[in-house]
Amino acid sequence: MKLAEALSIGQKARTGGASYTVLLACGFSPLHLQTFLRGHLQRVLPERTIELGTGLYGSLADTLEQLPASSSKAAAVFIEWPDLDPRLGYRSLGGWGSADLLSSAEAMLARLGKAIQAKPPALRMVVSLPTLALPPGFHTSGWQASAGELALESALSEFACKISLLPGVLVLNRQRLALTSPVQERYDFRSDLNAGFPYSIKHTDLLAEAVAGLLTLAAPKKGLISDLDDTMWRGIVGEDGPDGVCWDLAGHAQMHGLYQQMLRTLADHGVLLGIASKNNAETAEKALQRPDFVLKREKIFPAEIHWQAKSGSVGRILKTWNIGADSVVFVDDSPMEIEEVRAAHPGIECILFPKGDYAAGFALLQRLRDLFGKQALSEEDAFRLESIRNSQQFLEGVSGGDLAEQFLSSAEATVTFEWNPPVEDGRVLELVNKTNQFNLNGRRFTEAEWHQLTTASGSFVASVSYQDKFGPLGKIAVIAGQENGSTWNVEAWVMSCRAFSRRIEYQTLKQLFAKAERIQFAYRETPKNGPAKDFLRGESVLTRAEFEANCPPLYHRIENHHGQHRRAVS
Amino acid sequence: MDNIEERLVKVFETVFPDLTVDQIHAASQSTVSTWDSVAAITLMNVMEEEFGIEIDFDRAAELSSFSEILGYVKETVAASA
């Protein structure tokens, strides 16, 4: 983006949309950084009115310390070395070689860390660590890293590691930034000395784009469906045999091994993996069972291996996972298969596995990380696949009339309601913002909006966990709203598709009706929330009597846990 | 208007969106209230981007009106051609 374009975007932005208030915190003059950040945010959020505030010029720490009183929904923090000590820049003449530089920088990092820790819990913050080089005031030649520089880097790394673990804080990856913004093109000496703005225009653009991307990070994909031949491994298993396909350096097929390794990493982080391959199942299974198969066979479920169309295979896998095509990535080495799947499943992200193109292979690994990256791992990530396997067994059990009733009654199910869960529990908002099917109205919330809804006077919120004799499903539902006398208004209600057919939705309402006489739902139809619509049968108001007349038998054992800050249902 | 003048008017329109073309031709730091130090730097950077030139910061103080800037840009573009 050029500076003129960024200025134009800011000027042409529509007003009247819901506002998105961001604090830009930096110790230098915000000048073009403000323009580019606004431009990139506006491009990502065209319907929103971007309100960009800036802090106190010259003192990053003071700006951050005022955050608790700020009404900003997000903050973009740009730290440069002079913020840790002005002597680490070019605008101060206090001496570069001072012995106390390290202790001074460490003290400032501690102050910044404390201010960041004290930020409002619902505020999302992106922190950019120094992107510019240290000045030349060290005793070694420029090619030799001095102990002083390394000690400063070490102190910075320790600070970054600590803040990266705080809820709602995202630290910009400096290594990834270096791929797009070369270090030697970042600093503008002329601008720094004359205007107090240290970045080149190009670097400002790329840095602002990266930070805007993190501030508005899209929901990660949930599953990946892969082809086998010339994708999972090099070769055609039907021709080369299970022992003839390869994925290592010796077979000149390391890219395939790295792809497997990447998938294994994703699976360990809770990503669902499926196979859609046109092959003889028995032969392909033998290759998948090889002891040197980097991505272990048990990480894959389900595997559709036969000679039928891949679009059908993908459809069945989506049904088993019970997620939409837009949450899934499909990888295949055949452009024809890619097109067939893309046409049948609009929204699915299709990636052509590169053949003999090392640059494209390297880029594929980075792209997979980006598509599936999540801010933090949750307990549910560890057992998502097992839970889907168990769900398959469960659904087979409940699909048969009276037997189904018997099955539900013997499932030994426990439903746990956590009323007013802690704000730091990111899984609650993640569920609200990721769930499409059983979703009352499809409304998405920023951390700040969610905080506002759930901490207002008279509000209630519960996260719901489930487990039965087949294993735990983890946290699978959230309901939130307002108590209004005997009528309770439900503003948000979502339930993971993994939890369908267990009558958890009935149990949830039963808990509310323990106090409420009447429940009003802020229902709105969306293209995807058919299950919620079916459950409510078009009604937006339900009385206790109506509920009790239609509620099927419930066999759950109930546990209620209460948060500390607000009144809870008992 | 020649090509450089038209392009410079567009640069001014980007930085000072509230000015009409006539006002741009008569614009100077003393007549345009929004032409502050930040706008001056922004104007210089957008001009550099548009014309592919590097503006001498030491001469920036002399460039306080549209006509002065137009003369400077024509001179710099001709020198670099």
Image: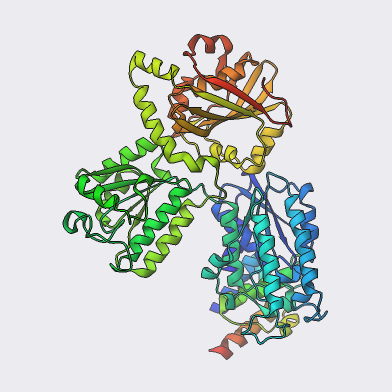
Q: Name the quadrant containing residue A433.
A: top right
- Apparent side of residue A276 relative to residue A377 in the rendered image (left or right): left
Instruction: Indicate the position of residue A521 as horizontal and vertical percent values.
Output: 57, 23
Judging depth in this view, the residue of B9 and A195 nearest the camera is A195
Q: Residue at x 43, y 24 (%)?
A: A501
Q: Name the quadrant containing residue A489.
A: top right
Judging depth in this view, the residue of A101 and B22 nearest the camera is A101
A386 w.r.t. A37: above or below: above
Instruction: Indicate the position of residue A161 as horizontal and vertical percent values.
Output: 65, 59
Judging depth in this view, the residue of B21 and A97 nearest the camera is A97
Q: How many marks?
A: 0
Instruction: Indicate the position of residue A487 as horizontal and vertical percent values.
Output: 65, 17
Q: Name the quadrant containing residue A33.
A: bottom right
- Check the image and name the residue furthest to the bottom: B79
A187 w.r.t. A498: above or below: below
- Check the image and name the residue furthest to the left: A239
Q: Residue at x 57, y 13 (%)?
A: A543
Q: Residue at x 58, y 78 (%)?
A: A184
Instruction: Indicate the position of residue A263 as horizontal and vertical percent values.
Output: 40, 53
Q: Residue at x 68, y 86 (%)?
A: A140
- Apparent side of residue A333 relative to residue A139 in the rendered image (left or right): left
A407 w.r.t. A35: above or below: above
A209 w.r.t. A498: above or below: below
Color scheme of the displayed model? rainbow
Figure quadrant of the N terminus of chain A: bottom right
Whether residue B1 appears in this view of the structure is no
Figure quadrant of the C terminus of chain A: top right
